[in-house]
Amino acid sequence: MAERRTALYRLGPVLAVALLAGPLLCGLAGTVLPAFGYLPALGGRTLSLDPFRQLLAEPGLARGAVLALTTGLAATALSVAVIFLFVAGWAGTRLFSRIVHLVSPLLAVPHAAAAFGLVFLAAPSGFIARLISPELTGWERPPDLLIVNDPAGLAMSAGLAAKEIPFLMLIALAALPQIEVTRTLAIAASAGYGRMAGFLLALWPRLYRQIRLAVFAVLAFGTSVVDVGVILGPTAPPPLAVQVTRLMQDPDLSMRFTASAGALLQLAVTGLALLAWLGLEHVGAMLRRQMGDRGRRFRRDAPLRLAGLGAIALTALVTFAGLGLLALWSVAGQWPFPDALPASLSLDSWASAASRIGQPLWSSLSVGLAATATALAVTVLCLANETETGRRTGTGAALLIYLPLIVPQAGFLFGLQLLFLVAGLGNGWPALVLSHLVFVLPYVFLSLADPWRALDRRYEAVAAGLGKGRLAALTRVRLPMLTGALATAAAVGFAVSVGLYLPTLLVAAGRIETVTTEAVALAAGGNRRVIGVYAFLQLALPAAGFAIATAVPALLFRQRRALRGGASSQGR
Amino acid sequence: MPRYFAAALLAAFLFSLPARAAEPDPSRWDAVLAEARGQTVYFNAWGGSEAINAYLDWAAGELARRHGIKLVQVKVDDTANAVGRVVAEKAAGKDSGGSVDLIWINGENFAAMKKQDLLFSPGWAEKLPNFAYVDAAEKPTVRTDFTVPVGGLESPWGMAKLVFFYDEARTPAATLPRSAKALLDWAKANPGRFTYPQPPDFTGSSFLKQVLVELAEDPSVLARPVQGATFQATARPLFDYLDALNPLMWRGGKAFPQNYPAMKQLLADKEIDIAFAFNPAEASSAIAAGELPDSVRSFVFPAGTLANTHFVAIPYNAAAKAAALVTADFLLSPEAQARKQDPKVWGDPTVLSIARLDAADRARFDALELGVATLPPAALGPALAEPDASWMERIETEWKRRYGAAN
């Protein structure tokens, strides 16, 4: 029996590699070969460096690459800093769990919707300007100010951070129960340390280790994001990922070669950003150690705690206000500047969407559920195999799993599309699920891996001591104890699947419409009412997912406070 | 596993040999109609307009009823995605049974697909029964798409003409510029109130072409491919103009709207005073959709503005070519064209010659009311021809170097 079970676990990494290797290797081949001039369908039959030469001659390329680096790093640093300030300052308090409940639904908001919300709020023609005009400002028309699309990418960094903070918060939340916040802080306090300093010295390294992969994902996403870059980023020149996408969409098909070279450059830039982040980690750790060695207690940290609270509150406020504005626009008639509210309301946009959204909603739901369930099963098998063998998933396999997160979609999808065509997988539902899996699996893995590895293995030792087999230890001890993390991972994976646009369009050849393909196609028309309606339709499914993920542990473990997955119980 | 996939991919690259089944022949129309019955047409068309999507829903109903064809609109945010799909299929050796049956296209995308032999050929469009009504005399762009001979590889669907609009509630009509030169003077008097979508966006590039055609000393060279030496000399007036205009633009020329809808929104938000589109009925449609105030009106440059035609084409490997032919023919029918021109439906001008229609069909067009902001055809001014596509590429690159790279 035991033999068979280990064999089952060993299937995990094998399945992960099998499901990901083909798509990834083909995806990369479909980018690397054209980048070096090889793509017979477009007349490229010899290898050459011409695509790179053409790429380097692209005006604004260097600046776009620098922008990708700076906005990605800035957004990540800002998100991590806010998470640190807030968790260090407030974990274990009642306010903490209140705020967490408030902020975590924001994770379901699609990036593009959050970015549009920010534009509707903060642009010179946005809601804030409308509120104070013309009374305070005298503006009868919007001032000519470069607030969004600023050349330095500040608006873009802020918009990204507003979306990434809830994500990191959720990941951190899943990790908190395992680092014994209250007891450790009590010990630090008894040694005279202020709360923030105590957390930084005693708890932060343990927490950060558990959210580190998610931070890498945030950084990779931030350096290669397209939609947020288009909506909030600089336009002359835009960040690299936007430039690459434009090249890929150039009507002159020979630009596909240049675009592929650009995709490789994007990969290098993302790699560079990760290296830079590793450097920052070292510097941070060094500073932290020096601080510990000096032994200052930093007892008066109230301003810093308030800053953390303020930053989180601002994040929530801005995103909720943005959503409110999307909702208002979705029912607005004429709404000229500087009116604070629309002159008339209408449900026309909702009515026309309602008549044809049923099928897309169902496709999103079924594909998302299938991809998430598969990803969850594969991840659990992989991690169970780790527990069993005591060996971490090999670097090769780990790299494979995380590759889809760091390879820019624009370049990698052409090869993916080729694979599905060559392998005769068609453009139906199974093919779509398989392609979604490539993007869902990494997120499920990174959401679950750290909590899984951090769970105290002595619980299983106790189970073994009580005569339980390894399977029973897994299903009756480990998995139940990780219910919160499992539900979170599933919700994250589901949200990723629902949000996929290009893979869905390209693999299913438009045969399967999802809420996101509908939303993106219609958003191309720029009608704010339609954007508002579809932002909510796109948000509905992931929001339901996260709501269920939050509710499940709470319902299942009404009697078991420490398992409710939140830090809510820690302070009492 | 990986090795198998890599081998398959390699095989696909190496052995992409064409294989042709018997193709439908539009000169034997009854056979085409018979073959088309029961087929499904996947029509890849920009999905950004609810009005256009609704029009295609109507067309789908009619095609199902009359010809037993199922028309499915694959809504894309960019035609390039559909073109890329055909490229991928060719790369994978899928030379029949492709997933794109009909594609909404013109200009550079058409030129690229034609050059790469990605289109159903030989020419079929002029053999469609309803092509007899097409106005090739008055509308030469139905046969030359951005100077590229169409050769029947795509079927005309609608006409486009560059039209400007403004809000008469805040901009007096008398102050409006009536030429590119006058527009520069207007911008000096109204700094920050004009912009154009960032090239290579289609509408933004069209504005550059409009200025190029107006200012070029010898516009006849624009009809031919760019010769190395002539580019600098011919394009200099354009870039001198843009150098002067850029600091006077919205956001000081440091940011640009990304496409036409974004520019339209800027007009609605009172950020800019003049916008432009490639459809004379666009302002009326936007008013009807509540996107622009009903005080918006159109104007043109009396010396002429750019005009072109948009088409539907069939990829070389389409799975349902017969039904795609029938669909293209239906879209060309007087009934479908008249409905499309109705500003309450879409407002896209017809490619047909009204004079050639019989009385009943002519009445359909006569019954159409122009929208409140639409100029009558006689007031649209002369049509300027599009420059050769090679000019566009050079100008877009030069534009990016000067204004798109923040030097």
Image (spheres, coloured by chain):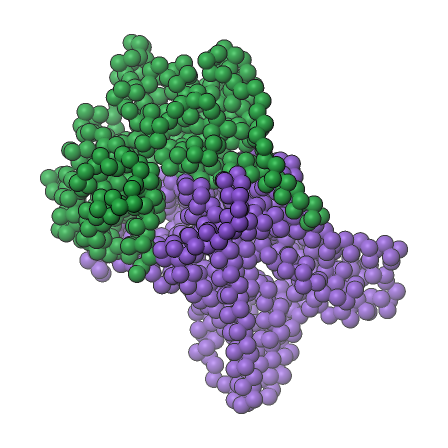
Identify the image quadrant of residue A131: bottom left
Q: Please tell me which residue is depicted at 53% across the width and 66% down the height of the picture.
A: A274
Q: Is residue A494 visible?
A: no
Residue B369 drawn at (x, y percent): 26, 23
Point out residue A390 in the picture as x, y percentages from the top left corner. Answer: 77, 67
What residue is drawn where x is 65% and y is 51%? A20
Note the chain letter of the purple one. A
Closer to the camera, A414 or A492?
A414
Q: Which chain is green?
A: B
The residue lying at 53 percent from left, 63 percent from top is A271
- Up/down of A192 relative to B81, above or below: below
Q: In terms of image quadrants, where is residue A527?
A: top left
Image spot of residue B35 (x, y percent): 55, 16
Position of the N terminus of chain A, as image quadrant, is bottom right
Residue B24 in view in this figure = yes
The quadrant of the image that shows the C terminus of chain A is: bottom right
Q: Position of residue A295 (x, y in %)?
A: 55, 89
A435, above or below A445, in the image: above
What residue do we see at 48% from left, 32% from top? B118
